[in-house]
Amino acid sequence: MRYSYLGPEGTFTESAVRRLAPSAQQTVPFATVPAAVEAMRSGSFARAVVPLENSVSGVVPPTLGELVEHAGQLRIDAQVAIGVTFALMAAEGTRLPDVRRVVSHPHALGQCRRWVERHLPHAEVVAADSTAAAALALAAGGPAGDAAIAAPETAARYGLSVLAHDIGTRNDATTRFVSLRRAGPEGPPTGRDRTALLITSDRSAPGVLTGVLGELSRRHVSIAWIQSWPRQTARGRYHFLVEVDQHIAYPGLAEAVEAMRRGVESLDLLGSYPYIVDREVEGERAAA
């Protein structure tokens, strides 16, 4: 099975691919989330793995945008949460006082903002498509005074020098990644499943959410996550992505979905899938 993912090599997304599909026949990095998803949608790849949300910096907008735009055409078929740590790295010979610009993915920059403000108060902060893309640019001969924030192992991969370790605001930060496929039948329940729904309505937001929560709670279905996304064609109106702790095969959830459909403009199933928590993250939670 061939997997596309948010690259380049060395991203946290590549680590998620290895966790989700250790026996994947081929994994190919793409520069952006939409490019990785389009490669899967076109049939060139069976799956696309992209980041969905970070526990510190929140949702990843390009991924949510793809889920909304292509609802009905794709499915989430697995999700994994992995721990993320960050290091500041630069070309060999660079010292911390030499750093004039810090480059990384916006989520990494957000998680490391306090450290950068404290130790590099005069450095310019610049966004990149991914943490590894920032490191790769340095390895390819980036400007003197540039440094990147990325996973510690990325420095060794690209021949960079680590200037500082563990610079994130929280040591227990995690990122959730989803594996996407083209639409089709759902896999069987595994006992550790989630289901994602995309709800669109012309009603006011409070009315929609009250109805959703009511139909689910009456059937003892727990909501794991709710995220709004603005509708481009209706100012002040939103899509709602709702994730619940249950498989769609569970009768109570199936009944709730049918009841919810009657009160909204549209409801798309985005998938029922196993939710995997990386062993390192489980260990951190047990020790907390």
Image (cartoon, helix red, strand yellow):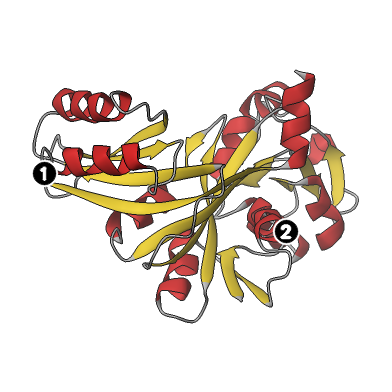
As displayed, is residue 264 above or below residue 144? Answer: above
Position of the C terminus by quadrant: top right
* Residue 173: percent from left, percent from top: 66, 31
Which is more toward the observer, 21 or 262? 262
As displayed, is residue 43 above or below residue 54? Answer: below
**Residue visible at 31% across and 61% down in the picture:** 70
Residue 91 appears in the rendering: no
Q: Which residue is mark 1?
A: 234
Which is more toward the observer, 113 or 201? 201
Q: Earlier in the sequence, mark 2 or mark 1?
A: 2
Residue 240 appears in the rendering: yes
* Residue 10: percent from left, percent from top: 73, 58
Disc 2 marks a residue whose amino acid type is: Gly
Position of the N terminus by quadrant: bottom right
Disc 1 marks a residue whose amino acid type is: Ala
Can you name the residue that lies furthest to the front here?
251
* Residue 257: percent from left, percent from top: 25, 42
Can you name the residue that lies furthest to the top here?
288
Secondary structure beneath label 1: loop
Q: Which residue is mark 2?
A: 10
Between the residue at mark 2 and the residue at mark 1, the CA separation in whole angstroms equals 39 Å
**Residue visible at 73% across and 64% down in the picture:** 22
* Residue 264: percent from left, percent from top: 13, 41
